[in-house]
Every structure is written in structure tokens, then in C-alpha cells.
Amino acid sequence: MSQACWGFEEQGRRFVLHSPLAMPQASTFLWNRKLLLQLNCRGYATAQFMQPEPAKYAHAPTLEARTFMQPEQPYYAHHPGRFCYVKDEESGLLFSAPHAPVNHAPDEFAFSVGRGDVAWTVCRDGIEVQWQVSLPLDDAAELWTLRVRNRSGRERRVSLYPYFPVGYMSWMNQSGAWRADLGGIVCDSVTPYQKVQDYFRNREFKDRTVLLHEREPHAWEANQAAFEGEGGLQAPDAIMGRERLACGDALYEMPVAALQYRATLAADAVEEYRFVFAPARDDAEVLALRARLLSATGFAMARTDYAAYLDEGGGCLRIQTPDPWLDDFANHWLPRQVYYHGDSNRLTTDPQTRNYLQDHMGMAYLRPATARAAFLHALSQQEASGAMPDGILLLEGAELKYINQVPHTDHCVWLPVCLQAYLDETGDDALLDVQVGDREGVRASVAERIDRAMEWLLAQRDGRGLSYIAQGDWCDPMNMVGWQGRGVSGWLSLASAHALSLWAGICERRGRARQASAFREGAAAFNDAVNRHLWDGDWYGRGITDDGVVFGVRADGEGRIYLNPQSWSMLSGAADADRRDRLLASIDAQLVSPSGVAMLDPPYTGMREDVGRLTQKFPGSAENGAVYNHAAAFYLHSLYAVGESDRAWQVMRAMLTGPDPADGLQRGQLPVFVPNYYRGAWRSHPRTAGRSSQLFNTGTAAWLYRCMVESLFGLRGDGDGLRIAPQLPSHWPRACASRQFRGAVFEVGIERVEGLRERRILVDGTPLQGEVIAAVEAGRHYQVRVELPA
Amino acid sequence: MSQACWGFEEQGRRFVLHSPLAMPQASTFLWNRKLLLQLNCRGYATAQFMQPEPAKYAHAPTLEARTFMQPEQPYYAHHPGRFCYVKDEESGLLFSAPHAPVNHAPDEFAFSVGRGDVAWTVCRDGIEVQWQVSLPLDDAAELWTLRVRNRSGRERRVSLYPYFPVGYMSWMNQSGAWRADLGGIVCDSVTPYQKVQDYFRNREFKDRTVLLHEREPHAWEANQAAFEGEGGLQAPDAIMGRERLACGDALYEMPVAALQYRATLAADAVEEYRFVFAPARDDAEVLALRARLLSATGFAMARTDYAAYLDEGGGCLRIQTPDPWLDDFANHWLPRQVYYHGDSNRLTTDPQTRNYLQDHMGMAYLRPATARAAFLHALSQQEASGAMPDGILLLEGAELKYINQVPHTDHCVWLPVCLQAYLDETGDDALLDVQVGDREGVRASVAERIDRAMEWLLAQRDGRGLSYIAQGDWCDPMNMVGWQGRGVSGWLSLASAHALSLWAGICERRGRARQASAFREGAAAFNDAVNRHLWDGDWYGRGITDDGVVFGVRADGEGRIYLNPQSWSMLSGAADADRRDRLLASIDAQLVSPSGVAMLDPPYTGMREDVGRLTQKFPGSAENGAVYNHAAAFYLHSLYAVGESDRAWQVMRAMLTGPDPADGLQRGQLPVFVPNYYRGAWRSHPRTAGRSSQLFNTGTAAWLYRCMVESLFGLRGDGDGLRIAPQLPSHWPRACASRQFRGAVFEVGIERVEGLRERRILVDGTPLQGEVIAAVEAGRHYQVRVELPA
């Protein structure tokens, strides 16, 4: 695989992969306000829309469980996807775009990932197929374009068969048929239910899946089994040896949406077809979708609207560095991922509280008003005890689901941690005085509510002064360390210390000296307790079980060292310089792998009941011992906090798909998002180590963006000013950034200067005293030059 | 398709289908005390075992929903199954047995269904593969035998690849590898959970799936994706163009169990291989399974044990009639299906109460002690109100699931209806005096408990004297007729009348005159109320909704006539002779279709909210308007009750796959079980009308057996005697039966005699007065001759 096999194009706004074989798992995603569409390079797809809970309109061929979004979902022949078969009517040659289901090696292939569209170009035997999808902004609908070009230099007769599997829609009822009046294939179903109350909820559902065509097809098939016959998906009976699809229907059978267009193409001729694939409720809605979207104009308008929407979330930083892959990722793709999290809330109705707060921490840099509203909304669900709930309900009638039904103890920590970023970015200290009513009707200011959250953290300590873990902290699989009510979390104790310190700092600034002092004392007490009970000589232990067993320590054969306590001991100040040196050396020696920094090591190979489910969840393979990027991002943040800029660079570099294609190929990760993990266990499982989860839902994105803005480029808000303190890796001689900040633009050039002894900052040519540009003026363009010692 | 394409062999004990194309959905099932295995003729399989809830050890390739057993499950390439690829090492030719996944047309094919085993014989290009499975009696394990024979007359080199897909086992953890020490492929997983309490339940699970081999393979593959590669299941990369499987493993990837045996076969040589495919908990259990089962001796012993088990459930009737297909079905397959229901309780831990009682009504003819215990167990869960719960919990810790969480009102009806059959068969009136304690510790006799159940039925009437339907009666989809508490069921009112009459009869016999009289009055009141409010001129209406709308009447465009009220009006005596003639004519005109008698007509095509979910569940396709055999069996029973023997024969004939293969082919139904429905809507959907559901869970089996024993052959217990009253169809000149009854054997010959005016019964040559052979003596052989007027 050569370097040319993939790369960024259009100034980083597109990413192109030129082989369907090199990274068969590679994927990207599109989303809008109603819909999330994950697309694999071979044509497989997973789509969800909200009604109001996540729902599907293209299904597996079997009854699927409802679940949260999964990493590393396997693909298989009948996995949902969007395909187009192409048959040469003269030679009988059959292939499919993008690649599956026929899987014939193409002559040319491109999987071209834009920020608002995905396109494949597949050429075989002189017939080039372009297959492209984009989303409108406000409809749950996919807009597909099929463009076929005859590059063979002679007339060709071909049949094109757009093939959209719809799958097993429902055991209650499913059917499919072509509808002349609606102009497409309509697959109907009834969402199963057994209880009367569910009926009333379900009857508002969009239980219909439609494939609408702009140009009338020559034939169609709505019955999956009839489409396949004996030939299966690789050589469907409906296509092979038949002139026309049979125009069949599905009656309580698995439906499919397959069309046939016969085209005679002169040399160089191009034909274009447009389709809308969407869930719908009834005929009226189908007709409205059709009228609004299904035309060249409709597609173009949708594209314009969507581009404008993306631009709103373009972020506050544009960079240019000696590493162009980083520029492309940081300028276009990372803010896009942050925006997805903050604007869609991961397509859930009950985001985990920690995720919700961190996602909106990222949103503070993109669209701070949204972040502000989210913080207020979260606090409106604070419990009377001061605790934050396990999930934030976004809609009337939403319920806590899955892991949010299990009690975790870390949610309060994220309030000051995330708010700090928001306040630094916006200077909006007025937020702290906003009155927030809760469900019991009690009103209190934001500051008072955070006080209570901090007091709750202080209250949830054992006799040693360590934080109870209950059924998990940030690490939700760790659900059995303290389920009996006695076990404690070393990480959470340190995170509480950090949160208390941050909040104390904000209180001080706001003249709340009494609170500041109490919280500072609390932070110190947490740090002391951790230093007393969990310092293991060269690193911090992870916790102590219900039965008093300290774990994450050198005595452990598996799970001997965890990354999180080390990172947060540097943030909280628990680790003095000596301990910091020791724990960094321990991380380097034990957790740094070729794929990045592992979350723990050695990975567990079996259950250790006194350390909780983590050992069972992932023995020796996926998340267990993985390069879990969210944890790596905390580490990154903590490294910058202590000025370890070169170590930080190594961590960030490992987290992203780097300039060496071999890394990316092994990982199966396109550099268009940062996944939640790469596989770990590199010593025991070298074959799979480094493999990407393909899951783009992760707090990593927000933290990575924060680190780039505030630390790598060191352009962090501070009071009414902007603090300038870049921490470039030592191999960069220079870098530039354009930073939008409170309505002003800072054009920042950073350069290492030979012979320079001390950092120098010039603002509009004038040397700056200290490192803060105070009293930033909206609308102004600042020219900032930072000179660093070489 | 000629008649020779299928048929019974071995005196009806095997059924053989000679084409994989003729009936691609055709299926059968095997079960033992731990396991249920549904097998499709092309090799697809669905298996469940109990731990204690139904669980799977071979999964779909995606996360599956837990659900009750579904009709008409679609098959697709990656559906679980048990296959063997065969590659000719010289020519490269590839095929698979049974048929999928390669789907190459075989030269010869046989799908041979035994009562205790299933075998395929597939021959292509001179290589014959025999692929056979049986079950041990007490292990959750499948015993597979592969026999390959070279029929080509010359030496051949082949590779055989037993291929057992294991699927997506778990999102928490899954892996697969070959284990030399265990002698097979071991796929491990962890059942996902999120709540601590689930962990403690799950850790006892058999979360491992193993394929154990007796003979060491030459190579293997444990990784599904590696097995398939680009070729997919039709031409796996692991097989095509490679000498050996790659001996790979799966690490948090989808596992598979695939082996390779290379064999050089002289002309006519045969090679044999044995495998065990099973769930297991740990190494020790795998080794124990291996030692107990995996040998020629182990397989043979398992087969002997299983045959003995089947013989226990052989039933009480052997017949010989002018319709040999009926003899084969009634002598071997119908009792087997009844036995499955009664002995396995459909592999549920909470059978619906009505199903449980009816399944054990069937068991009364096979193993009455089991039926007795079941009736007592059911009554021990009677509620204080006299109501029966929606499901009967069979195990400590079991819970009411799915539809059993929805309140239905018919469960009490089945107590006398099913008990009548048990008492007639056994004469065990002592059961009525058995004291049964309930959950509150209250003790009462069986008779008293049934009194209370009848009183509950009488109490649950509205002002019109009709039975409230709540969220459904026997027809559980009909959940919205009366959910507001006012709607009533015409069928349930009639069924209550019938139940009360039956119970009054039993009370009379037991000298409980007061109760008998009260219940007779109650029955009459129900009949009167139905005649007053629901007689529609030519048939009975189905019910009245919460809003007072009568439905199932001539005014309705859809759902105009329902079968059940008509059947039960004949059983309850509500219908006088005139009404009976009218309703029978209405059934003939409106419900009798080419595939049998529909449950309602015309099928609903959309929701009609005032008639409940039925309209939504099945608009125009499957169960809605289907030939729902359970309802057809009630009709059958009611026809015999009023002496309509020829109409009854037509109903029974339609319910079974008849002598004309064309019927069976269209239905896709092998005559080895009666399915729960055949598709209806024959006028609107002729393409799919008649198609079998392939679902063998149905109360039909017990009713059909009861009708054959008690009505068609008319050999019903009565007090201490046996009543002889056969109702042969008029086209039968003669028939014979051997009837086991209370330890005696009755050899019964029935013949039509020209010129005879009245039926004559001779017992051991002596004319019988009346039709009851009184005081039956255990151990005695009775010769009975019945002469009927021609």
C-alpha cells in the first residue's frame, strides 16, 4: 500500500481512500438534526433517527436488539448498506458499488469523505460509477446521487440496480411494494408492541421506509428473497440471466428497495439519477419529502443549507504547522466531531451526565450559547442532595436507559472542570448568578448549585477521606469495586481535588472567599488522603475494594497500573515533582505502546471479582488495556498542565492517525475523527493491537480540541484577556494560528529564534508585558508574534 | 415437481424431501430436555437451550433481540446453520451440504426427517455427503455425523470443511480459538450486563460454544471474517485457492467453528467423522461432554436413550385408514408434537396459562401423570380472586414476560375444558379432591379452586351479561377492544358458557348438585346474553368495544365474521338448530378458503382502533385472516360435537399437508407437524395464501389429537368405560384403530356395511348395548367391531 492510496484533498476538507481492500473497516459519519449515518468504505451503513428515541429505517435481516452505539460492529453480507449493482448487458459482467455485495476488485476506487457528503467512485471495465450521499439539514432523509460515465470509448449497454436493503422491519407487520403515485418503493411496517400504552406512543412513528426516484425505473423488486434467489447477494437471481427485475412485492416478507435502470451510453456519456431514502409516516409525508428534496434544485439547496450549518461549528482555531496532517485534522475534522457531539448530543435522549458536560465543554469553543444552555439544563436536574443524576433527560418523557440506570459517583466533578473552559472562553461570569429551578421547584444560582455539588463530593468520602466509587466512576465497567458501599476510587478522589481547586479559583475571582477557602481545604484533604493511602512507590493505585484490597499497584499481576490516577494527580497537585518524575517514568515504561498510551496494563485475562466487571468486560482484547483515547486525552491535558510539551506531543500524535499510512492501515482509522479507542494488549495480541473501534462517540474530541486551543497553541481566555502560552513540540521550528476569541481575531505566528533566552510576545509589533493580552476588543484583529528560544 | 419428490418412509417414521429448491422454507425440529433445534432443509438452524431462560449458542451476525419464538423467520446467508463445504482438490469444484451457503444445485439431494434425527444426503460429481444430527436426552448438545462416500468409481482427493457459524456472541467479550487439549474450537464470550445483580446470575451461564471433533482435523479457522474474506460465504477465501485453512483465532471478533479434513478416497470408500456442537460453561464441562458423547458408542447410546424417550410419548392411538398420509401423521408425528409441547412446555419458564393447560390436555393422552402434575401446578398459582394468572411460572425466579404482562380474561375457561379431557381419559376423579396450596398459603381442593375460577368468570360480566375482554382473550392481539374496562368478548362469553356447562356436568357426577345447578344457570345466562346482544342474523358477532360498537358483524367491511364465536356457540349450546345451519352456511361462504378455514374475513387492511390491535398486527398478510389452526381445531371439535363429520373431515384435511404434493409445496409445510397458521387473505394475496408459518408451537396439536381419538375414531373415556362413537368421513368404507386406554388395548375395526340401518358395535363378538364399554379392565385386549350404515 503506497502513500498514494489515501490522503487529504481540497485543503483538507476531503479525505480519499483509494482501495476497498486496504482498510475494509474504514468508516465515517454524517449527521443532521434528525439523523445519524455511519458509512463504511465498502457500502455498509448504520443509520439512526430520533422519534424521539433512536430508531432505524434500514434493518438487519433478523430481529435486532435495541442498544447503545457499539464499537467494532461486524459487517456481513446482509448488513444494512446502500449499494448499486451494475451489469454489462452485453458481456454479462456484474459488479457493485461501492464494493460489497459483489466484492469484485475494481479497476479504480475512491472512497471520498467530505465534511457534508460521502462519495465513492468505482470504475470497472470502462464503466465509472459515482455514488454519493449527503443529508438535508432538517429532514430525516438521505440524498443519493448516482452518476454513471462510459469511459470505455465505445457504446455500452448497462443496467444499473440501486439496491437498498431494508431488512427485517418488524414481526408485527412488514411489506414492500412499488407505488406509482409516490414514485418509489414503499416498505411498510408496524413497530411491535404488546402493552396498550405503547400503542399510543408508537402510532406516531415513522414506520415506513421509502426509496424515492426522480427518474422512472424500468423495473423494480420489493421482495428481498425474490431479489436474491439461489445466487445470493453476490449474484442475485433477479439480475443474473434476467433482462428485468420482476417487479415483485413483499407481503409479511422481508422487503427490499431495488430498482433497475437500463441505459445505453455513448462513449463518454454520463447519466445521473437522484434518490431519497428515508423513514416516513404516511403518503402525505412521502409526497412532501419528494417535493421538498427530490430534484437537482432540492439537492443543491440542501447542500447549501448543510454547508452553512457546518460553518457555524467551524471552531475558533485555524492552524498551520510543520505537520500538515495535523492542520487538516485540527482545522476541519476535529471541530466537526466536537460540533456533532454538542449539537446532536450523540443522538440520545438521556446522555450520560459526564458526557453531556464534556461535550458542551467542547461546544464552548464553537457555539458557546449552546454550551451555556446545556450547563443550565444539566443543573436543573441536580438532585436535592447536590448529586448530579447519571443522565440528563433532554425531552419530556425520556428515561434513563442502559448504563444510566447504574449509580456512578463522578458526575459532579465535571461541573467545574467543564465550566472552567466555558468561562475562560467566554468570560461569561454572569452565568454563575443565573437562578436555576430544579424539579422540586427549588431555585438556586449556578454558583450555589456548584457549591452543593462540591459539598456532595466532600460528603461522599470514607473514613480515610477517599471517594466512594459505588457502581463505577468515569470508568463505568468498574462496577464491582464498591457496590457494597465501602470501596473507594483513587482517581475520583484526585478528580474531586482538581474540581474543588478549580471551583475555589472561580469563587476567589468572584469574591466568595469563604467558599474558596473551604473548597481549597477540601482539595488538599483529598490530595493528602490519596498520597497517604494510594501512593505505591512509583505511581498511584486505582482504588480500594469493598474488602479493603488496594488495586492498580505493583503487587497486581494484571491491572497493575492505571493511567487516570497519574494524570489527575498532576492536575490536582497531589503529585510533587519527585512523584511526578516517578509516575511519568512508570507510564513510559508500562503504558506507552506502539499504538498510544494504554488505560491500564497488563490487561486482565480473566475476572478478578474484587476489581469489578472491567476484568470481565474486556479480557485481553478490546477496551481492556486499550488505548482509550478519552483517558489519553486527560493525560494529554495533564502533561500540558505540568509543561511536558514533548511528551504531550507524542500522546496527541499517537491518538490521531499520523502521516505514516502504515499506521492508519493497521488501525483501520481514517483521519476524519478520533475514535473512542484503539485496541490494546499489544504484547499478548499483536495482531489486533492498534485497531480502531470506528466509534466516533467519545469525550476525546472535546478534550483534544481544548488541548490544541489552550495548550498546544496556548491561546486561552483569562479574565477579560487572552493568555498566550504555546507549548509547541520541540521539533517544530514554527507554527501559525488564527484564533477567534470573543469577537476578535488573533493572527498568531510562533517561531523559534536562535540565541533567544526567554520567550518574547509582540502584539501588533509591541512587546507584551507578561503573557496576557488584556481587555480584548471585539471586532479587532490582533497580530501576535511569539518568539521562543530555539 | 413430481410426487416422488417427497414422501414418508420406514412406515411413516421418516419423511424425505428430495429437492432443496422445491420448499426452501421447509423445516422440522428436534428437542430434548435441555435443547430445541429447528432445522431448515437447506441447513439453516435455530437452537435454544435453557439457562434457565431460553438462550442461544449460535447467533446471528448482529446483536439479536430476545424474543418469543417467531413464525416465518427469514433466512439469509449468515443465518445460523450447520454446514459442510466440500472441495474437490483436483478440479477445485466447491459445494456445500445441506445446500447453503454455496447453493449449488446438487445431483442428488435428500432431506430426511426422522422422529429423533435429521439427515441430509447430498451428492455432487460423484461425492456423496451424509450429514446427520441427533440429540442426546439430557445434554444441551448436538451430535453431528459426517459421512462422505466416493461414488465416482475413481480415486478422489477432497477437503471437507464442517462450518458452524457462531455469530455475534456478545458485545462485552467474544473470542474463538482451537484448543488442542479440548479437541475442538472453543468460542468464549461474556453475556452482557450492566447491573450488579445481573452479574451474579450471569456468571453461572454457559457462555462458551464448542465444536468438538473426534478425529483431529488438518486445519481449522476460528475467525469468521478471515474465513470469508472477499469471497464471502459462497466462495470463502479460506477455502478457495488455499490448501489449508489458516488456523486463525478471533479476538473480540466474530468467531466461527470451521475445520478442514483432507481425505483421499478410493472408489467406493467411506469416511466418517463425528462432532459435538454445544454450549458449555468451562473446560471441565467440555471434557465431560466429550467423554460422555463423542464416540461411536456415545452416539449410539444417545440414540437408544432418545428413542426410548420418544416411545414414552408415542400416544394412545394407532390407526389405519384409506388415507395413508393421515395414518403416518397420526401414528408418529402428531403425538410427537403433542409430546414436545407437554414435556418441554415450549422451552419457556412462564408458559401462557391457556397454552400450558391445553398442552397438558394433549399430554393426558400420552403421559397422564405429567398432565395431572401440571394441572395441580397451574392451580397453585391461582389468584385469591379466583382468576388464573396470565402465565404459569415453572421455576423459582421466573418472571412473566412479553405478552404475559398484558391482562387477558380467558385463562379460567381452560380449566374445565382441559380437565374434562384428562378425566375422561384417566377416570382420575380423585384429582378433584386434591388439596392445592397457593402462594398466600391458602389451601383448597381442586374442585373448590375450579368453582372459584367459574365464579370469577361469572363475576366478570357487564350489565348485559357478557364477559369483559380487558386487553385480550384467547386472541391476544385483540388488545384494544376493551382496554378501558367496558368492552366485551362474544367468544369469551360463549367459552365461559361451555366451561360452566362442562364443570356443571362434572359437579353433578360428583354429587355436587348445588354447584352444578348454579353453574348451569350461569351457562344459560351467558348463552342468553350472547343470543340477545350478538346474534347478527346469520352468525354471531365477535364482541362489543369500549365505545359500544358491535364488531364481527355484517355491517363491517373488514373483520365481518370471526370463526371462534361460531365454533363455541355450537359447543356451548347457544346456537339452536336454525342458527347452527345459518352460521355453518356463513362459514362455508365466507371463511372456507382453498387453504382451510380462516379465523376471520375479510382481513383487515388497516387499523380500526375500536377493534383493537388485531387490525394493525396483520393487515392483509400473515395471521390476520389466516388459517389459524388453533381456531380451526376448535371449529373441528365443535363440528364433531354437533355430528358434522364430513365438514369436520374437510377442516382436518385442510389443516394437514395432504396427499397432493402440490398443496404441500405451495405451503412449504412438511407433514411432520401442524404449524400454527397458514397464510390467509387468499382473495387479496393469492401469491402467499396457504404458506406455512413453520412454527410448531401451537395448541392445535393437542386439539387435533383429542379430535382424532375422541371424535374421528370416537374412542372416548366415559366414567369407568370407553364410549365408542366414531365419526368417519363418508368417503371411508373402513378404518382400523388400536387404542390404549387405562391399561387395556382396544383393537377396533370400523366398517360400512351395505343395507345396515343402524350402527352396531360388537365387543369380542358380542353386540354391545348402547355405545359404552363399561368397567374397562386393565391388561385386557378388547376386539371391537363397529358396523356403520353404508
Image (spheres, coloured by chain):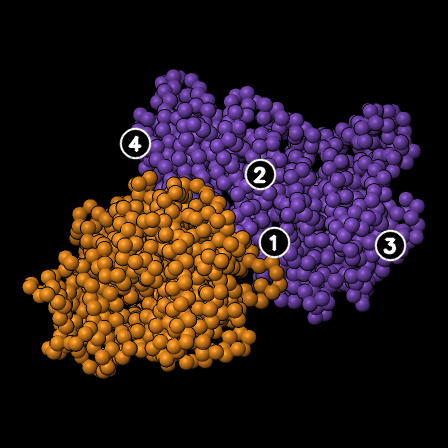
Chain colours: A purple, B orange
Q: Which mark is residue A402?
A: 1
B14 vs A625, nearest the viewer: B14
Q: Classify A257 as above or below A608.
A: above
Q: Residues within 10 Å of mark 2 (few under 14, many from 20)?
A: many
Mark 1–mark 2 CB contact (< 8 Å): no
A17 vs B36, nearest the viewer: B36
- Can the viewer see residue A747? yes
Separation of disc 4 and disc 2 at Cα?
36 Å
First-in-chain label (4 vs 2): 2
The structure residue drawn at horizontal position 18% and vertical position 59%, both measured from the top left corner, is: B729
Q: Which mark is residue A242?
A: 4
The structure residue drawn at horizontal position 88% and vertical position 54%, both measured from the top left corner, is: A520
Chain under numbered label 2: A
Q: Residues within 10 Å of mark 4 (few under 14, many from 20)?
A: few
- Can the viewer see residue B354? no
Separation of disc 3 and disc 2 at Cα?
42 Å
Q: Residues within 10 Å of mark 3 (few under 14, many from 20)?
A: many
